[in-house]
Image (cartoon, rainbow, N blue to C red):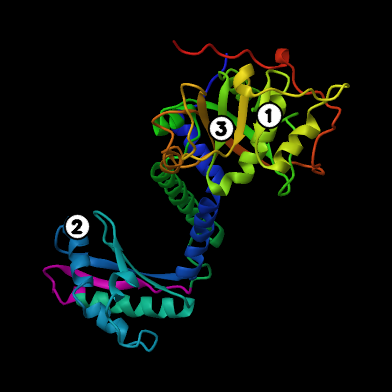
């Protein structure tokens, strides 16, 4: 029992393989941004305790009263007089100086945060004294307040996120952004990865996906061990007698030549095939195909024998009589080509002649690359290839 991933999953997987660098860049940028934009500052916090020695009002209103008095500006003005603050009261309360009150409690904690622990303790005592003075201004109708304990110079900084944690959170955010960008690229590009992509783009079937090993320019490898070439040959070998042409974009010409050589070799023992291609391409095929001991016999015209004329790179302006010579066209394109580019490639043949598409995936090949396989290697026989599928009625 086999399972095939949904179409959008395969498209996204292809986009991740080819645009993974986008995700990598986003992750690195996300990890570096917190360290560059917001450098780590070690803050120390000092606390001074203010208590109500006598409380006339209900204790439940004390928290709201304390916060109102603390924020009226008198405490900030008193703290701003310290040389460490420099008279700047903007944002002083509650960013740097704040008060914490508990419900139904007569205690209030004045907190000050600063990079220097001694300065934090000094400013905390200054703020606590100013706060107690302001509370006592309300008179005996509210209560009497005083500073019960002065601030102690802190020895440990506040718990802050370490650089490693901040970088990790930034990398996670970058990963999410990168994956979103790749998904957007896949949606806009609409790569052709599956048979459904090819069918929706040009309305013809995907004949197969060939995993092409890398080779130097002008080097033609044989069909042995190339994944997908047997599937492609199965389709092409079932073509009726006539002309079978491979086309591609100019940028994929070398890829098309290599596919032409492999398919020609694989079909050489399946049916009679005549080749029409560049000289070096035909010579590469001949090096793979074993010759008869008596030498090659003269061949009649393909129209007379019903053989297949296999053409590399035909022109859409070539005049062919379809009644006398059936002409079929197969497009060769790299795996992941956008649907728009594939439609443009097959535009001149979509009205007639285009029978399928071959997608090619380039693979790295380890070891030394030879120009041809062993000339003694036997070409695939008919029984080695899958049986051709019946043509639709």
Residue 392 point in image, percent of width and height: 46, 13
| Res. 39 in view | no
Magenta-tinted stretch: 135-153
Q: Residues within 10 Å of mark 2 (few under 14, many from 20)?
A: some
Q: Which mark is residue 59?
A: 2
Residue 265: quadrant of the picture: top right
Which residue is the site of mark 1? Answer: 264
Q: Which quadrant would the N terminus be assigned to in this image? A: top right
Q: Where residue 288 sits: x, y (%)?
A: 79, 31
Q: Which residue is mark 3?
A: 245
Q: Earlier in the sequence, mark 3 or mark 1?
A: 3
- Tag count in the figure? 3
Magenta span includes 352: no
CA gap between label 2 and label 1 equals 96 Å
Q: Quadrant of the C terminus?
A: top left
Q: Residue furthest right?
A: 293
Q: CA distance from mark 3 to mark 1?
A: 12 Å
């Amino acid at each position: 029992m086999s399972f095939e991933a949904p179409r959008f999953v395969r498209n996204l997987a292809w986009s991740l393989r080819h645009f993974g660098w986008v995700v990598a860049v986003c992750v690195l940028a996300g990890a570096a941004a917190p360290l560059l934009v917001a450098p780590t500052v070690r803050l120390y916090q000092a606390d001074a305790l203010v208590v109500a020695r006598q409380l006339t009002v209900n204790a439940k209103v004390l928290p709201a009263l304390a916060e109102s008095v603390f924020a009226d500006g008198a405490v900030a003005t008193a703290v701003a007089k310290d040389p460490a603050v420099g008279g700047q009261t903007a944002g002083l309360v509650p960013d740097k100086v704040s008060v914490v009150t508990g419900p139904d409690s007569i205690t209030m904690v004045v907190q000050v945060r600063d990079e220097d622990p001694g300065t934090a303790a000094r400013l905390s005592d200054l703020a606590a004294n100013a706060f107690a003075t302001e509370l006592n201004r309300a008179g005996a109708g509210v209560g009497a307040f005083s500073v019960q304990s002065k601030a102690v110079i802190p020895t440990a900084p506040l718990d802050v996120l370490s650089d490693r944690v901040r970088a990790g959170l930034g990398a996670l955010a970058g990963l999410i952004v990168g994956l979103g960008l790749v998904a957007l690229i896949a949606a806009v590009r609409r790569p052709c990865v599956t048979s459904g992509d090819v069918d929706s783009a040009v309305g013809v079937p995907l004949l197969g996906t060939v995993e092409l090993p890398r080779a130097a320019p002008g080097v033609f490898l044989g069909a042995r061990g190339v994944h997908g070439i047997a599937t492609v040959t199965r389709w092409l070998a079932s073509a009726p007698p006539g002309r079978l042409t491979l086309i591609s974009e100019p940028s994929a010409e070398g890829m098309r030549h290599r596919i032409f050589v492999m398919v020609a070799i694989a079909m050489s023992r399946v049916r009679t095939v005549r080749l029409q291609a560049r000289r070096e391409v035909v010579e590469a095929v001949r090096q793979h195909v074993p010759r008869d001991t008596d030498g090659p016999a003269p061949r009649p015209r393909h129209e007379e024998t019903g053989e297949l004329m296999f053409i590399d790179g035909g022109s859409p302006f070539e005049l062919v009589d379809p009644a006398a010579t059936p002409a079929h066209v197969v497009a060769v394109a790299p795996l992941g080509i956008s649907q728009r580019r594939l439609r443009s490639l097959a535009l001149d043949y979509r009205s007639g002649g285009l029978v399928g598409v071959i997608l090619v995936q380039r693979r790295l090949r380890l070891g030394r690359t030879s120009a041809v396989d062993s000339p003694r290697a036997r070409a695939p026989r008919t029984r080695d290839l899958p049986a051709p599928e019946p043509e639709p009625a």
